[in-house]
Every structure is written in C-alpha cells, then in structure tokens.
Amino acid sequence: MACVALFLLFPFLFLISCSGGYSFTGASIPPGAKTISIATFPNYAATVNPQISQKLTDELMQMFSSQTPLDVMSTEGGDLQLEGEITGYDTRAAALSSADEVSMNRLTVTIKVRFTNTVDPDASFEQSFSRYRDYAASRDFSSVESSLVSEIVTELCEDVFNKSVVNW
C-alpha cells in the first residue's frame, strides 16, 4: 500500500521540484524572474474611453498575480517589464442589410505593448494587439459599450499574457 502511495506521489513531487518555473496555467517563467512591473497603459486613441486604461492595467495585474508566482509591481524595474499604450478605440460599420443599411457595428480596441525580459532578453518583444466585438446597429452604443469593453479587455489581456509568458 505504501508503495502505491509513493508511486502516486512521485509525479507530483517531481513537478514541484522542477526549477523551470512552470505553473498549471501554462505560464513558463524563466528561472531567476521574481517580479513583473506593469505600467499604466495611457490612452492615446483618437476616441477616449475614460475607464479603459485603468481596466486594462488592473486586469493585466490581476492575471499575472493569479496565474504566475511573480510579484506584481506597479513601479518600474521588475525582472519582467510590461508597458504600452492604447492606440485605437474605433466604432465602424461591420455589416450591411439587404436594404444597404448598416445592420452591425464593430468596436475595435488596439494596444501597443512592450515586454522586456531582463532575465532572457531574447524573449522581449514589441507588438500591437487588436480585438473587436460586433453589436447590432439598432442598439445604442452607450448601452452596450461597457460590456463590449470588458470582453475586449479580457481578450487583450489573455493575448498579452500568452505572448509574454506562455511559450506555445
């Protein structure tokens, strides 16, 4: 019986003892990286949503805090550094009806991200990410904006997280 328990416990102990910084979320943190600094993303889009900057920054901090062993800092100087800006916030027609009237609109949010990995500089990058959501043209934008922004911000944060620390 003790042999069976040891056999079942061994793989778990092996995973815990590995020094590669693996987490069950798929994040691969380089050995030696203990902190990540996440700067507030200023909004440089032509159209400004006053809540999106803080929402994006907070969600990134929460994601890195809950899914990695890294200490999240709002000041500069982490072993991993994430900064960027919101460069686009646009609403445009996405689809026409058979009567050549706009039937769907699209909200698109674009961010530019700079990720610096001081432990493994080859893993650093600068890239733009963009996500969108369509909504019925018959709906008032102000009535759907908050939910659309929440969905888009979550997807953008997942994209940034995956590019930064998930090596797939």
Image (cartoon, helix red, strand yellow):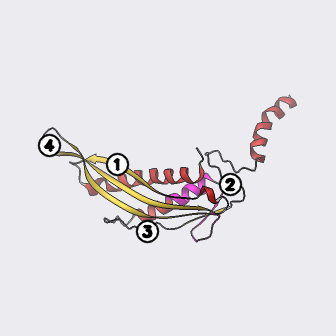
Q: Amino acid at mark 2?
A: Pro
Please report contact status of discs 3 and 1: CB closer than 8 Å, yes or no: no
**Residue drawn 64% across the image and 44% down it:** 24
Q: Marks 4 and 1, Cα distance to the nearest angstrom?
A: 21 Å
Circle count = 4
Q: Which residue is mark 3?
A: 42
**Residue drawn 60% across the image and 47% down it:** 167
**Residue drawn 66% across the image and 58% down it:** 120
Please report contact status of discs 4 and 2: CB closer than 8 Å, yes or no: no
Of the numbered discs in the image, which one, if any, rests on residue 133?
1
First in sequence, mark 1 or 2: give its number: 2
The image shows residue 56, relative to residue 15, as above or below, that is below
Q: Which residue is mark 2?
A: 30
- Is 9 left, or right, of 34 in this rendering? right
First in sequence, mark 3 or 1: give its number: 3
Residue 67 at x, y = what percent?
60, 52
Q: Marks 4 and 2, Cα distance to the nearest angstrom?
A: 54 Å
Q: Amino acid at mark 4?
A: Asp
Instruction: For mark 2, give the secondary structure.
Output: loop
Instruction: For mark 3, give the secondary structure.
Output: loop
Quadrant (top left/top right/bottom left/bottom right) for the N terminus:
top right
Mark 1 against mark 2, which lies toward the viewer?
A: 2
